[in-house]
Image: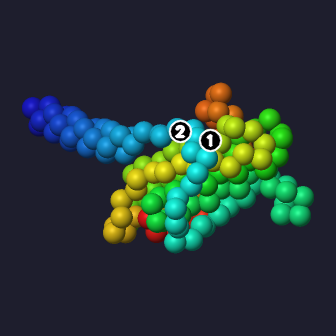
Amino acid sequence: MIKSRSIKRIGTLAGTLSAAVLLAVTQASAVTAETERATDVNGPASVDSWECASSGESASVGWNATVCYSQLGDWFYLHDGKADGSSAVVDWAIRDAQGRTVRYGAVFNADGAGAVRYKNKDFPDGSNDTIRFRACLGHWSTKLITAGTCSAWVTRQT
């Protein structure tokens, strides 16, 4: 009888822990990716400053992709610098004060070499959130970023 009670208690404890873990995993995976195409040919009327990242060759040879972020209005700038068959992509993530990702996504400039496109987003202002972004190469047709093509992450307040 004592053995049976212990087994029931262990089963109850295991069930409770499983439910807690499932709830945490469900809440963590509630964030879905935002995959979009930058189509605006005109950017913001004014910006505080652009924070930029580049991917590919080098400044002297020409970057394959340059992406920038402006906190004023939450604008992305994307420049496709090379006719290499890839799109310039900004890979981004919004993190809260505890470092948890609360929003993330990718914006593609699929309009070819030399094209500059802009994308306006709406991120929370006045919070302790930060944005991390980087320049990458990818393909709009598959909505995928090409592995090994991304710059280092740049972090800034939203």
Q: Amino acid at mark 2?
A: Glu
Looking at the image, the residue that sits furthest to the bottom is 48
Q: Position of residue 40 (x, y in %)?
A: 57, 45
What secondary structure is marked by label 1?
A: strand
Looking at the image, the residue that sits furthest to the top is 141
Tags 1 and 2 touching, CB below 8 Å: yes
Q: Position of residue 70 (x, y in %)?
A: 53, 64
Compared with 21, 75 (above or below) is: below
Q: Amino acid at mark 1?
A: Phe
In the rendered image, the quadrant that contains the C terminus is bottom left
Q: Position of residue 23 (x, y in %)?
A: 28, 41
In the rendered image, which residue does mark 1 sit on? 108
What secondary structure is marked by label 2?
A: strand
In the rendered image, which residue does mark 2 sit on? 36
Q: Quadrant of residue 139?
A: top right
Between marks 1 and 2, how big is the CA–CA gap? 6 Å
Would you call the spot at circle 1 few (<14 residues within 10 Å), some (14-19), or many (20 or more)?
Answer: many
- Asked which colour scheme the image uses, the reply is rainbow
